[in-house]
Amino acid sequence: MGLYEDVERVLISEAELKARVAELGAQINALYSDEDRPLLVCVLKGAFIFLADLVRHLRIRHEIDFMEISSYGKGTASSGVVRILLDLEQNIEGRHVLVVEDIVDSGRTLDYITRNLRTRGPASLRVCTLLSKPARREIDIPLDFVGFEVPNEFVAGYGLDFAEEYRNLPFIGVLKASVMAGL
Ligand code: PRP
């Protein structure tokens, strides 16, 4: 069907994602204890599939919450100004917080989120991202867990969109140039 015909190539297969997400889950299990009861903060919308798969590998007690941040306009001269569209339900003071992202690109979104959350007094604040695109980094944010480093190409699938579509692809792929150009 049309959606799959728009894919130029698969960058990270479904099987590779599955294996790596299981490894990340094991690392998170090893880092936190039941007593820590970490709060996993899913950054919407891109991280929703990653979070859903990741938590099924967790054996420690934990909770989840959601945040959504406005996009600041990619590929344009960015002011770096972002704002919160949806905030956490939970008070994170004294909590162990693990931010779950799909991709860190320039680092601006994560910089904003971590600075914002830190003002709320969490016991600890760590970051788990499925993908990191170091070639595009503008702000250096420490990443505690990284699934894969990806080259400087636009990627979609497994939660990541192009113009709000393709999030359902079960792999991370590169779309055809004609699709990206809107042809
Ligand atoms: C993506 C992604 C990160 C951010 C990374 O979100 O989910 O939050 O961009 O880019 P940065 O490091 O350059 O800030 P997007 O704005 O595409 O929203 P979405 O998750 O709702 O698709």
Image (tube, rainbow, N blue to C red):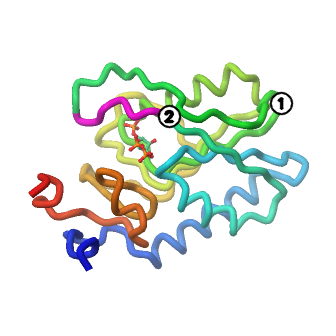
Specify few, some or many for label 1: CA neighbours under 10 Å numbering under 14, 14-19, or 20 or more: few
Q: Amino acid at mark 1?
A: Gly
> Which class describes the residues within 10 Å of circle 2: few (<14), some (14-19), or many (20+)?
some
Mark 2, ligand 1, within 8 Å: the answer is: yes
The image position of residue 157, as x and y in percent, is 38, 63
User: Which residue appears at 88% of the width and 54% of the height?
Assistant: 34
Instruction: Say which of 3 and 26 sits in front.
Output: 3
Q: Three-letter amino acid code at disc 2? A: Ile
Q: Which of pointers 1 and 2 indicates the residue nearer the eye?
A: 2
Image quadrant of residue 89? top right
Say whether disc 1 or disc 2 marks the residue closer to the N-terminus: 2
Would you say 124 lies left or right of 8 here?
Answer: right
Which residue is drawn at the image coordinates 23% and 71% (left, top)?
9
According to the picture, the residue beneath numbered tag 1 turns out to be 94
Q: Residue furthest right?
A: 35
User: Can residue 182 be found in the magenta stretch?
Assistant: no
Residue 110 in picture, x, y percent from top left: 50, 34
> Who's the residue at 23% across and 35% down the image?
75
> Where does the magenta region start and end?
70-75
Camera-side residue of 139 and 69:
69
SS class, disc 1? loop
Query: In the shown orientation, is residue 142 left or right of residue 54?
Result: left
Ligand 1 shows up in the quarter that is: top left
Q: Looking at the magenta stretch, what is its main secondary structure? A: loop
Q: Residue at x 12, y 59 (%)?
A: 177
Kindly state the secondary structure of the residue where label 2 is placed: strand
